[in-house]
Amino acid sequence: MTDLPATVDAGQPRWRVPRTARDPRAWHVLAAFAVVGFVIGISQNGAAGVVQDQVKDLDTTVDVLGFTMVAYSLGVVVGAPLLMVGLGRMGRRPLLIWMAATFLVATVATVVAPTVEALMAIRFVAGLPHGALLGVASFVAMTVLGRERRGKAVSIIMLGLTTSLIVGVPFVQWLSNAAGWRAAYGVIAMIAAVALVGVWAFTPDVPGSEHASPRSELRALRGRPLWTAIIAITIGFAGLGAVFSYIVPLLEVTNGYSADQVTWILVIWGLAMTLGAYAGGRLTDRSHLGAGRLGLALSAVALLGIGLVGDVPLFTVALLFLLGSSIQVFSQASQVHLMDVMHGSPSLGSALAHAALNAATAVGTGLGALVIAAGWGYQAPAWVALVLAAVAMVLITVGPGYRSPVREG
């Protein structure tokens, strides 16, 4: 990587932009985005680690709390395309700053949510900037590294997300047990403040699209390859939401692990996701279509195993490791494919990828809540996810844009 050129034109008020952003260093920019991914990962995935404590504090049930996670994911689904279509001309730096600030405010509001109904509404708002943050950050990271290393650019931000699973989510689960889930989200709010400062300090002012308009951006949302890719991501990634959203009761209730043991299993899960992010970046730069098919196929094997032997403790942990690593490979490959399909508007393509991933989380988590509420147990969501993965495999094998890809490589 090389240092980036200064991005502030001569004659502009330079005092408004810190020196670190006027004369940016690539590693600083990518590190700031990794922190953004880290805090978003803790906020979203940490919800699964505090479910048991929220049940007691908010006087509700696990399946109802599952819909607070659905609300967050729906916020991402709504916010990502809405913000990117409406703000296409806005500079990438101010857009990232405003979205990071909105995320911080919503995280603080989560800490003081008085009821489960209020929590659902707040988590929806918290999800609104998620896709724009990660989508625009992915585009700026790709600008830093160059298009030929776009898989690595996406993987650096995803490493922030997966690192949160190794360190952040287990810590949130432990802190929730020790001091309550509100204290856990208070710490998340502090990290969100650090992320906001990092974005302000290091993000170069990459311009928006001069010709962008809601009409032109909406025109980019046409074509069978695009919608096939969106549907494939949504259906294929649903397995993660279906299983991970209920991972704590699966481990504690179905497999008999203690809360302390679950903390360390969550660390193992995070390691699996990080391994998948690392491998996914390398495999995607070789062939994003091949990487996506491999990741989804291995995910289906893991889901089948959880459905069959997900009540055998050691097998369950091993299968969760396989699921976490393989679904991450599929996720990264799918994001790059969607950016390639929308090569005329890569920021919107990346944001749509995150919207699709969170639509998947909403689908998986919601279906999981329904089968759990029906009394089918905590293994049942894996069977639902397996059916969806099979459909997704058909799409990414013979669907438009996959048989004759728009751009390979």
Image (cartoon, helix red, strand yellow):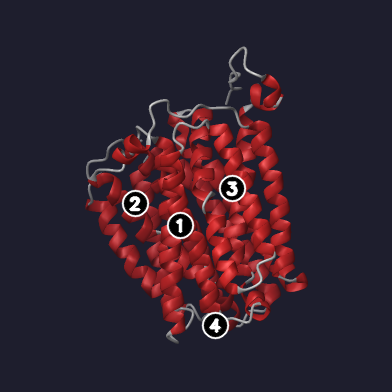
Which residue corresponds to mark 4? Answer: 254
Cα gap from disc 1 to disc 3, whole angstroms: 14 Å
* Identity, as a three-letter code, of the amino acid under mark 2: Ile
Q: Which of the two labelled residues, at mark 3 and mark 2, occupies the earlier sequence position? A: 3
Q: Which of the two labelled residues, at mark 2 and mark 1, occupies the earlier sequence position? A: 2
Where's residue 35, x and y in %? 64, 45
Which residue corresponds to mark 3? Answer: 37
Cα gap from disc 3 to disc 2, whole angstroms: 21 Å
Residue lying at 41% horizontally and 41% vertically, measured from the top left: 85
Q: Dot 2, how many residues are within 10 Å of its Cα: few (below 14), some (14-19), or many (20+)? A: many
Which residue corresponds to mark 1? Answer: 358
For the residue pair 178 and 19, the one nearer the viewer reads as: 19
Tag of residue 230: 2
Where's residue 286, x and y in %? 40, 38
* Identity, as a three-letter code, of the amino acid under mark 1: Asn
Q: Specify whether residue 167 is in view.
A: no
Residue lying at 53% horizontally and 28% vertically, measured from the top left: 144
